[in-house]
Amino acid sequence: MNQRDGEPGIVIRPLTANDAAAFRRLRIMGLRESPDAFTASIEEEEAFSDAEMAARAVPEAPGIFLGAFAGEELVGMAGYIANARPKTRHKGVMVAVYVAPQWRAEKLGRRLVEAVISHARSVGASLLHCTVRADNVPARRLYLSLGFVPYGLERDAIFADGRFFDDELLALDLRSGPHAGN
């Protein structure tokens, strides 16, 4: 486990309804830091009731939100949303990858994405999609290093603070590449 001097190791585990308050805090932190990196807004997140947040933290299976915990503190997250229709059930989407700034040196983003890849494979997905803001070099570098391949660009995907931002569309074939069979 990764540790900082005198701090507990990081544990990555599925979120539960009991994590809803921490989930909300971390999502709002991410939206404050990078409002143009996510499609949600702070106002939307704050408007959810506690029950709605608990339901969002624990999506319908095989979807999942994974959290990176330093002791009791939620310091990172990443989600997997499955396609429900029979003809597209083989595909899933990785969403809401975020690590608190003070924990980024711990490589938690990589650990969370690897955990999502592992989960996707364990539920039978053969293709994992994600989007990344086209100018988010660190996130893009991470996804490409794990085998994701760009397949498109969505121009003006997000409108925030009076500006448009492009998203790059990425896919990981879970049947091949460095993460196949893991």
Image: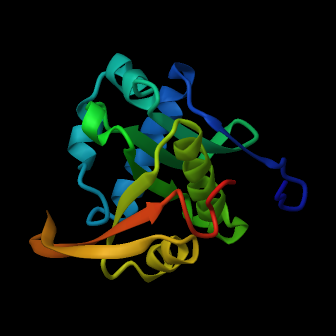
Location of residue 39 by image quarter = bottom left
Residue 85 located left or right of residue 8: left
State left or right for residue 30 relative to residue 66.
Answer: left
| x and y percentages locating residue 116 in the rendered image | 55, 49
Residue drawn at (49%, 35%) of the image:
64
Q: Nearer the viewer, residue 97 or 87?
A: 87
Q: Position of residue 126 (x, y in %)?
A: 46, 50
Q: Give the mark count.
A: 0
Taking depth in this image into account, of 9 and 85 the one nearest to the observer is 85
Q: Is residue 171 above or below residue 82?
A: below
On the image, the x and y values in percent for residue 173 come to 47, 62
**Which residue is drawn at the image coordinates 21% and 76% (left, top)?**
153
Q: Quadrant location of the C terminus?
A: bottom right
Residue lying farthest to the right in this orientation: 6
For the question of whether residue 76 can be seen, the reply is no
Pick the front one: 5 or 76 = 76
User: Quarter of the image containing the N terminus?
Assistant: bottom right
Among the 4 quarters of the image, the one containing residue 132: bottom left
> Looking at the picture, how far across and down is residue 6, in whole percent?
90, 55
| Residue at 35% over, 76% down | 150
Q: Is residue 75 left or right of residue 168?
A: right
Q: In the visual, does 81 lie left or right of 44?
A: right
Q: Eyeballing the image, is 165 above or below 22?
A: below
The residue at 50%/79% (across/down) is 138
From this view, report whether residue 61 is shown above or below residue 87: above
> Can residue 18 be seen at all in this image of the molecule?
yes
